[in-house]
Image: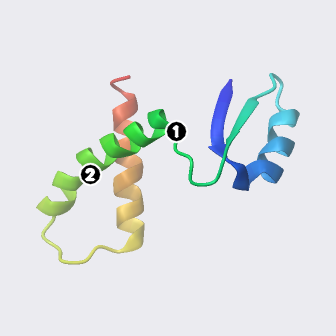
Amino acid sequence: MEVHCDNEFHIVMDNYSIKQDSPIQMNYMAAKAQVPRSKQGNCTILECVGPTYHLLPYTHLPCILVKYLLTETARKLIFFT
């Protein structure tokens, strides 16, 4: 398994990746660097959340509702991969 993440998580992820049965290869990116695949995934999620967000009859949404809206959208996108 291979994980791309920001160098900010270096301390936490090194300890976690070593403890796994099959070691995880960590690829740390420089600050402000972007991984094209993850950026594309984020854009896809936002494209799916946008219409749902705007169809809701509320002017403001609680943070917890936005969190679950994003989580459910990402989970449902996995069905099609």
User: Where residue 35 is drawn, which disc sits there?
Assistant: 1
Place of residue 36 in the rendered image (x, y in percent of width and height, measured from the top left): 46, 36
In this view, which residue lies farthest toward the bottom? Answer: 60
What numbered label is drawn on residue 18? none
Vertical position of residue 58 compared to residue 48: above or below: below
Q: Is 24 situated above or below 57? A: above
Q: Quadrant of the N terminus?
A: top right
> Is 36 situated left or right of 24 in this image?
left
Categorize mark 2 by other alpha carbons within 10 Å: few (<14), some (14-19), many (20+). some
**Can you tell which of label 2 and label 1 is closer to the viewer?**
1
Residue type for callout 1: Val
Q: Is residue 36 left or right of residue 52?
A: right
Placement of the C terminus among the 4 image quadrants: top left
In the picture, measured across the screen, residue 73 lies left or right of residue 52, that is right
Residue 56, image x and y in percent?
Answer: 16, 64
Quarter location, residue 75: top left
Going 83% across and 25% down the picture, which residue do you hit? 21
Residue under the point 34% across and 36% down: 76
Residues under labels 2 and 1: Cα distance?
21 Å
Residue 74 falls in which quadrant of the image? top left
Q: Nearer the viewer, residue 80 or 14?
A: 14
Query: Which quarter of the picture shows residue 27?
Result: top right
The residue indicated by pointer 2 is: 49
Along the line of sight, which residue is nearer the eye, 22 or 14?
14
